[in-house]
Structures are given as structure tokens and as C-alpha cells.
Amino acid sequence: SGNPWGVAQHVGGLSFDGNNDYVDVAVGGALPVFDGSGAAYSIGLWVRGPPRDDDRVYSEGSSQGNSPLLTLGTGRSSNGTTDRFQVFIRNDGGGVLLNQQTQAPVFDNTWHHVTWIDAGGSASVYVDGVLDPVSFSYSLSGTWSSMNRVSLGAVLRAGTCCHMQCDLDDVRVYDRALLPSEVQDVMNASPQGTAWTAGTTGVGFDLGVGYQSLIGLDLQSSMSVVNASAFV
């Protein structure tokens, strides 16, 4: 709705209105990054938004059903964590493997950098480069046989829900577990937007700090650069 582009943490980012805005990222190759196999991956992003009840900034799901999910977003009003960062993982059969929130506030209308790292269930969250003391580790079980949707600002699956009101910038997805020193480097590094090869799904992105991401949106470049469509 209106102009989605605005000044963000690194040059420019996207503003989501919390009603019907989202970015639908094309899948294939390396995305979705989570498949329940235990393969390590990491997701980092800058976000600024208010406390919200169970809304999402990043999601991986299925167009064939609503059960299988990996989502990152806000906590819940039912347990007083609407200002915290929540990770939610559920398998094909509806089994919830993880539903946990950070101790550190994230959704307080100021910019925060968050990194989610998962290596076969040995998982952690960093807020502004600092390891959150809450345990996010979980045990893998069940299947994720039909994961084929990746989105920003909402959950896209058989249906659409959980639209987040926020500003979002510098979203990066890695096919390995970042080291603590790398979390700091990624948080502090400006995106190198000229390194992209337009129109290539899952293309590598040179961050200028020696790491490769599967997607790396500084959210100032055009949607075609990330092979994505937007509803804003």
C-alpha cells in the first residue's frame, strides 16, 4: 500500500503495513533453506517494528497445506512476549517442534539485528550480535515434504496470514551455521548490492566479508534481482 520503499538500516528497506503487504520470494535451488533433514542454515535480518501478536517477518511454508512451517516473527500476547523475537517450527503432521521467544526485546520500534542459527536442532538466536540466553534447541521429528514457499512480512502457505507491521532490511540466508564472529561481521557489514546476478534463483552474494549467502536483500534493489514478486 503506497510507497513501500523507505530509509532503513543500510541505504533503503521495505515498509510493511501489517494489513496485506508481503514479498513472495521465488523458490528453487537453495530455497527454502529448511527441509527438516538437519542440514545447517542461518538467517539474519534487520527489523524495526512495534509489539505484535504472533506476526511474521520471515516464513517458509507449503502451498499444499498450512502445517509445515519455519517462521520468524513476534511473540504472543497470551504469554506477554509481543515485543520478543519468536521462532516457530512445525512439521507436516502438525507437530510443533519449537515455539520459543527471546529474552531480549526486539519489537520496540527501534532497529535491531537478529540472527537465527540452526544446525540440526542445535539452535540459537543472536540479538544485536549478542547470544540470547534462552535455549532454542529442539529435536527434529516428522517430515517437511512440501516446503515450497518463502516470504517476507507474512506467512504464505495454502492461505496467507500473520502480516507484520515493520520495516525490514538486509535479509540474508546462509546454507551453513554462522560462527559468532561471523554474526558480528554480517551485522556490521554494509550490503554490496552490485554483486548480484539478476534473475538467478539462489545466487551466491559476495558480502565483502568473506561469506556467501543464498539470498541477500538490502531491499533497495529491484524485486527482479532476487527473483521475487511483491504485494505492497
Image (cartoon, helix red, strand yellow):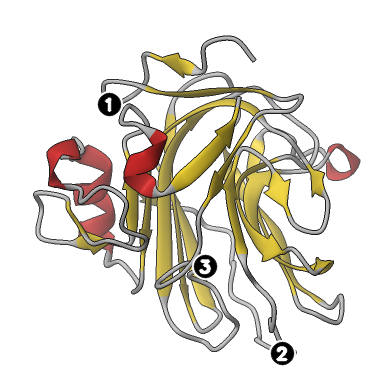
Q: Nearer the viewer, mark 3 or mark 1?
A: 3
> What amino acid does circle 1 point to?
His
Of the numbered discs 3 and 1, the one sitting upstream in the chain is 1
Residue 10's disc number: 1
The residue closer to the viewer here, 222 or 18, is 222
Please tell me whether residue 48 is drawn above or below residue 125 in the rendered image.
above
Q: Quadrant of residue 143?
A: bottom right
| Residue occupied by mark 2 | 141
Q: Quadrant of residue 19?
A: top right
Q: Position of residue 201 (x, y in %)?
A: 37, 60
Of the numbered discs 2 and 3, the one sitting upstream in the chain is 3
Please tell me whether residue 206 is drawn above or below residue 20 in the rendered image.
below
Instruction: Give neighbour class at mark 2: few <14, some 14-19, many 20+ (Cα, 10 Å).
Output: some
Residues at marks 2 and 1, CA–CA distance in whole angstroms: 38 Å
> What amino acid does circle 3 point to?
Pro
Q: Position of residue 21 (x, y in %)?
A: 66, 28
Please tell me whether residue 215 is drawn above or below residue 48 in the rendered image.
below
Asked which secondary structure carries label 3, the reply is loop
Q: Is residue 65 left or right of residue 14?
A: right
Query: Does any portion of residue 16 appear in the rendered image?
Result: yes
Quadrant of the image for the C terminus?
top right
Residues at marks 2 and 3, CA–CA distance in whole angstroms: 18 Å
Instruction: Give neighbour class at mark 1: few <14, some 14-19, many 20+ (Cα, 10 Å).
Output: some
Instruction: Give neighbour class at mark 3: few <14, some 14-19, many 20+ (Cα, 10 Å).
Output: many
Q: Quadrant of residue 212?
A: bottom left
| Residue occupied by mark 3 | 32
The structure residue drawn at horizontal position 42% and vertical position 43%, both measured from the top left corner, is 45
Q: Nearer the viewer, mark 2 or mark 3?
A: 3
